[in-house]
Image (tube, rainbow, N blue to C red):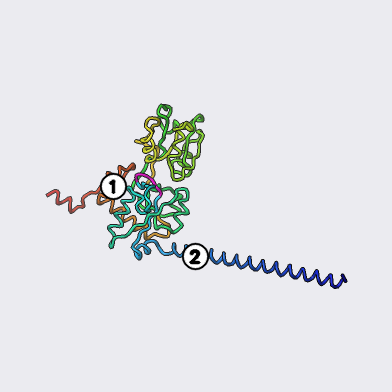
Amino acid sequence: MPLTNKYNANRSSWLLYAAVTLAGVSACLSLLSLFRSSYIANVAATKNQIAVRALERIQKSGVMRVGYGGFPPYTIVDPKQSDPNKRVAGFAVDMVGEIASRYVPPLKIEWHNLDWDTFRADMLSGKFDYLADAVYDTIPKAADFGMTDPFSYFGIAVAVVGKSESRFRTFQDLDRSDVTIALAQGWTSTDYAQQHLSKPKFKMVTVGKDAYTQLDDVLFGRADAALNDVPTVVQYVNAHRDKVKALWVDHPPSSVPASFVTRREDWDLLEFLNTSIRILEVDGTLQRLDKKWNSLGHFEKLDLIPGAGLAALGQK
């Protein structure tokens, strides 16, 4: 083949290869642009959904979207119930029902289940307006979210131990190097234990939606003690009375307030819920729900004194 023809043939091949390559690159860029546009649209839609203040959306739609995690007896989940709005009952559920029914006109309620392990992401997703559960107040949570006025207070860092265990008369008796303590990853009792105990071996357990998983470590001999809040410990021990017992339930090492939770920007919804909770406290609703659900927390004592005019009437 003459040199010129060979050059032209090679040149044609390279031009064809370059054209095919450029076409492929162009197609890839078009797909990337399409995916990027779709992603931006989805993100924008989510931001717009969240940008509308929750209380404003509730007032316009007449629907209150409420999240829950599952924490008996405050939110009790029935896994056999297929209707998401009938799957949950309990103390906090009835509180929400009272608030919704007293609104004019009454609000409908949509319930949305969240996972405690993805609490932050679920709160910011915009899928629900606020979380109605016994959520323990902590300083980090208060920096990230709106926490309502507490509606109850809970003991933490109480222990589950074997039935015959006799070494731990006080919380500080746990502070010894020959002790293994099972702790739930990310829970308030865990934070307290790590701050106040330095010698034990801590066995960290990821509990997900089953808080009792961590307490099983005592039942099956994998830990000497397990620490958690009073509601979780009491219900677990009641189910396994022949093998384990609870320590310090009457005098827990520490206590925390519990609240509903909103997104930080929903300050008006937070105020609405604060006022609603105060009404339920003063009119006796919380006391009624306490008896109905045998709640496992403590309440503030409402101590009202008569005004001067009423006091004067009593003296006549």
Residue placed furthest toward the right: 2
Residue 154 vs residue 232, the one in the foreground: 232
Residue 125 vs residue 22, the one in the foreground: 22
For residue 44, the mark is 2
Point out residue 141 in the picture as x, y percentages from the top left corner.
Answer: 44, 51
Q: Which residue is mark 1?
A: 289
Whether residue 77 appears in this view of the structure is no
Prevalent SS, magenta region? loop
Residue type at mark 2: give it: Ala
**Left or right side of 176 for 304:** left
Point out residue 217 in the picture as x, y percentages from the top left corner.
Answer: 46, 35
230 is higher (above) or lower (below) than 273: above
Residue type at mark 1: give it: Leu
Q: Kindly identify the residue that appears in the image at 38 percent across and 45 percent down.
A: 71
Indicate the quadrant where residue 292 lies: top left
Magenta-tinted stretch: 69-73
Whether residue 221 appears in this view of the structure is yes
Q: CA distance from mark 2 to mark 1?
A: 41 Å
Q: Is residue 132 magenta?
A: no
